[in-house]
Image: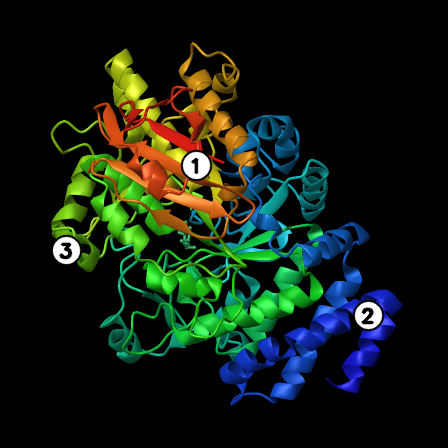
Amino acid sequence: MALVIESLARERLGVREADAFLTRLEQALFDIRQPLEALYGEVVDIDELVNDLVSDAIDAAAARPEKLRIFDRRREIDPVWFQRSRMIGYVCYADRFAGSLEGVGKHLDYLVELGVTYLHLMPLLKPRVGENDGGYAVQNYDEVDPRVGTMADLQVLADDLHDRGIALCVDLVVNHTAREHEWAQRALAGDPVYRDRYLVFPDRTLPDAYERTLPEVFPDMAPGSFTEVAGLGWVWTTFHEFQWDLNYANPTVFRAMLGTMFALANRGIDVLRLDAVPFLWKRMGTDCQNQPEAHLLVQAFRALTGLAAPGVALKAEAIVNPDMLVQYLGAHDRYHPECDLAYDNQLMVMLWSTIASRDVRLAEHALSRRRPAPQSTSWVTYVRCHDDIGWAVSDEDAAAVGLNGFSHRRFLNDYYSGSFAGSFARGALFQENEVTGDARISGSAASLCGIESALAAADEHELTLALRRLESIYAVVFSFGGIPLIYMGDELALRGDPHWDDDLAHADDNRWMHRPAMNWAAAEYRNDPRTLEGRAFAAIRGLADARRSLLALRAGGETEILPTEISSVLAYRRAHPRSAPFLALTNFSNLTQDVDAGVVGRAGLQAPRHVHSTTGELIVDADRIQLPPWGFGWLTGT
Ligand code: GLC
């Protein structure tokens, strides 16, 4: 380690902090240098780059508020702090939940009542004006969206959340900036230094060559992956034409994004959600996702943020196939720390697939053949998010259980868009691709579970079944070994927003149907068990209460699928060295199911004991366990 870095640290950080920083640096130096050398070794002097970045980290560490240093210390003692059973997440847009950041601060009692200990606020950095993909087109990374508040408000909120034991996660849009970002504007004005921060081509030759192997993310509303910009050329725009992909082959881009990470960390952000992270590096002849360099970038971000703010975790938003996905948690041939958290997209897809098919075999197969996540990391498990559901069902997994992948995906689209005869779901197709026949699904969890249709039909029995579906899939995400995320409104069985397309800026993007504003009037009924809201709220809160005390439900570790003789019952086991094993059973059918109690023994449970279930009791006799229609049961033992 260069002497100059050492004296810089001592000078800027004081004796104690410098000592801690330098110890971390000694440990991390390989993890910092190796990826940077592979990425930039040929374009810059690598010693100089490492020195510059480490010196940025020293500045960030020096600016870190004392209160956050205390978090750092705690989390260095317990680096898997996010795995605790009491971690329960909630995801919302600040403006849609409570108008502003200040408004969010006024609703913390509500979150605490629900058991929330992790709050993910959707994009809140200053977006471009007008259509901005729900905030995923950032104009200025140093400012908060003025519609929701200021950086100072964000810091105050983080502080208030911490006082309540709630960690704060925010989005960081790393792959692209808005066309209105200062860099893009300077590029437009002809400055080659700024043009080189994006991927700009003089004509269609290279874009055409790339597009031969590039899938389209938004084939319907934003076809193609390049946009012609007058005076500049063809700009790489994976998503919308106003979202310009950054050129990470340019180390200046990396350094600036790292600077944003440091700044957010020092405002009190605990978890950074790295948006669209698979797209960071492009390579001719590939789909330009999950390239080795994208991983090197995340490794370098990880190592450097850990230096300045060791209490901060990184979360990958990588909606890619499971073998690719687990690599964002560092699972390569040799473990390379990357993100601490990643979305368990496959579990989410399998839950919806199973609800529609009422057959767990595909889920059993797909979920049991996955590579485990590294022990120091965790999945975030979820039922719904602000995006569409893309049917990540591989042809191989489908074939293994006798299904045709394409037909099954088509069936799921028909089922959830409501066109399949007898379907209770009220969703809609998103980005139907006429060329490939693919489509995805929009719709709120409540509407996809049948709550909307049951209400419309005033069918009390159907409503109960639909609510049970919602509770049961939440029961899975609360017990599958990740941090469960509650998507805003699901706790009140909030349906979609029927007026989502009134706002013309969103009219071609039906994901807005499941991004409604919070209904605080409905929330008033949350403690009234006679109401839909009361029933949903009690169900979700009940899961949080039960989960908190179960060591086996800590995130991390392994979940073992235990096939039963009944094709509509999903059974899995969790264990923790310091507790009795845990067994979850979920019935994905309209019928009562009597499961052979042998599964209890196979799960290693002695003296099985009911801990939580749909109805609050579980009939377990010597050879049968009874599960009500769409019901679940959690058991533990001694
Ligand atoms: C992520 C976001 C999605 C957005 C895209 C582009 O996938 O979740 O909403 O459209 O990135 O930023």
Foreground: 249 or 309? 309
- The residue labelled by disc 1 is 606
State whether residue 434 appears in this view: no
In which quadrant of the rendered image does the N terminus lie? bottom right
Which tag is nearer the camera, tag 2 or tag 3? 3
First along the sequence among labels 3 and 1 = 3
Up-down: is 199 above or below 528?
below
What amino acid is at disc 2?
Ala
Q: Position of residue 518 (x, y in %)?
A: 49, 28
Foreground: 283 or 339? 339
Q: Could you give the CA–CA distance between mark 2 and mark 3, rounded to whole angstroms?
A: 57 Å
Q: Residues within 10 Å of mark 1 (few under 14, many from 20)?
A: few
Residue drawn at point x = 36 percent, y = 64 percent: 324
Up-down: is 180 above or below 150?
below
Q: Residues within 10 Å of mark 3 (few under 14, many from 20)?
A: few
**What secondary structure is marked by label 3?**
helix
User: Residue 512 occupies which quadrant of the picture?
Assistant: top left
Q: Are marks 3 and 1 in contact (CB under 8 Å)?
A: no
Q: With 488 as the anchor, is 367 left or right in this view?
A: left
Q: With 36 as the anchor, is 516 left or right in this view?
A: left
Up-down: is 559 above or below 250?
above
What amino acid is at disc 1?
Gln
Disc assigned to residue 399: 3
Disc assigned to residue 18: 2
Q: Position of residue 380 (x, y in %)?
A: 47, 48
Q: Could you give the CA–CA distance between mark 2 and mark 1, rounded to whole angstroms?
A: 52 Å
